[in-house]
Amino acid sequence: MTTIVFDKTGTITEGKPKVTDFINISGDSEQYILGLTSSAEFSSEHFLAKTIVAYALAHDIKPMKIDSFNAITGHGIIAEIEGNNVLVGNRAWLEESGIQLNILIEQAETFAKQGKTPVFASVNGEAVALFGIADQPRSNAKNAIARLRNMGVTPLMVTGDTEQTALYVAQQVGIDAVIASAKPERKLEIIRELQAQGKKVGMIGDGINDAPAIAAADVSFAIGTGTDIAIETADLTLVSGDISKVADVMELSDATLRIIKQNLFWALGYNTIAIPVAAMGKLNPMIASAAMAFSSISVVLNSLRLQRK
Ligand SMILES: [Mg+2]
């Protein structure tokens, strides 16, 4: 394998967005603001709301009693909690409600450059907090990619996501070749183009749209938590989603090939020397049979070394 094509979402990243940043600009404690905003989000079905609730629970915040709750699709929510009017949502929702976001806007723009989704919150008409929510790279992704590079494999990331988000994730994990805003069929085209250049191409992905590329690649890997079609099409499934296993597999296959070559050398070596000597009648049959046995034993012992991998 000389090149490996990575899908982004769910392959390099966990595929589960999380709160990565929480900025509190109110005069109140983080606990209190997080309590109000997460309680307001508690009844929302929106995936961004769920990440805020999960973040609050992870920080031991107990939900507060909600007196009223209303979700405005595509905008956010409004809730009454212990006499406070709480708004959580996107910029448009808070600005339309007459909230001055001021300094939070600049921070939200930085988040956007990092592929993070900003979520604003206000309490009683005052902007109080900003959340940054993003799908984070898997903890071992950077290490896995560094190991593959050391083995002479060039990584390439292909994603349907925007260039900004794609580049930010790629930079975090050490990939410098990125194709963003790719249509689903583009992944397959890229595999074919690389193969046409004489490259041995690996593909690793988790989604339905990765399956054609997985099928066309010379070696393919699916993420164990991915879609059934990706798993069924791939040569190998990374059960725990540990992408550093790709490097392990390459090391093991290199070692296997090396040992096959050594075995061939030793098995043929004994015979190419011993057979002509025996044919000349100059080989003691006792030594000949011992040599025969040793050739088999050396091959078996040499192969058993693979168990240590
Ligand atoms: Mg994916």
Image: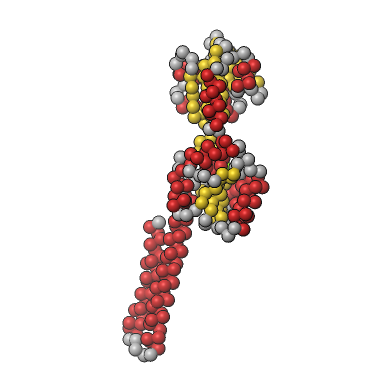
Q: Relative to residue 46, is residue 252 drawn left or right?
A: left
Q: Residue at x 41, y 74 (%)?
A: 267
Q: Residue at x 37, y 71 (%)?
A: 297
Q: Residue at x 49, y 51 (%)?
A: 246
| Relative height, residue 266 to residue 148 (above, below) | below
| Relative height, residue 83 to residue 288 (above, below) | above
Residue extending farthest top: 83
Please tell me which residue lies in front, 167 or 139. 167
Residue extending farthest bottom: 281
- In the rendered image, residue 234, in percent from the top left (x then y), is placed at 58, 52
Q: By what rule are the colours in the image chosen?
A: secondary structure
Q: Residue at x 59, y 29 (%)?
A: 47
Please tell me which residue lies in front, 198 or 209. 198
Q: Taking the image as drawn, is residue 273 in sight?
A: yes
- In the rendered image, residue 296, in percent from the top left (x then y), is placed at 39, 73
Q: Quadrant of the C terminus?
A: bottom left
Q: Taking the image as drawn, is residue 206 in sight?
A: no
| Relative height, residue 165 to residue 191 (above, below) | above
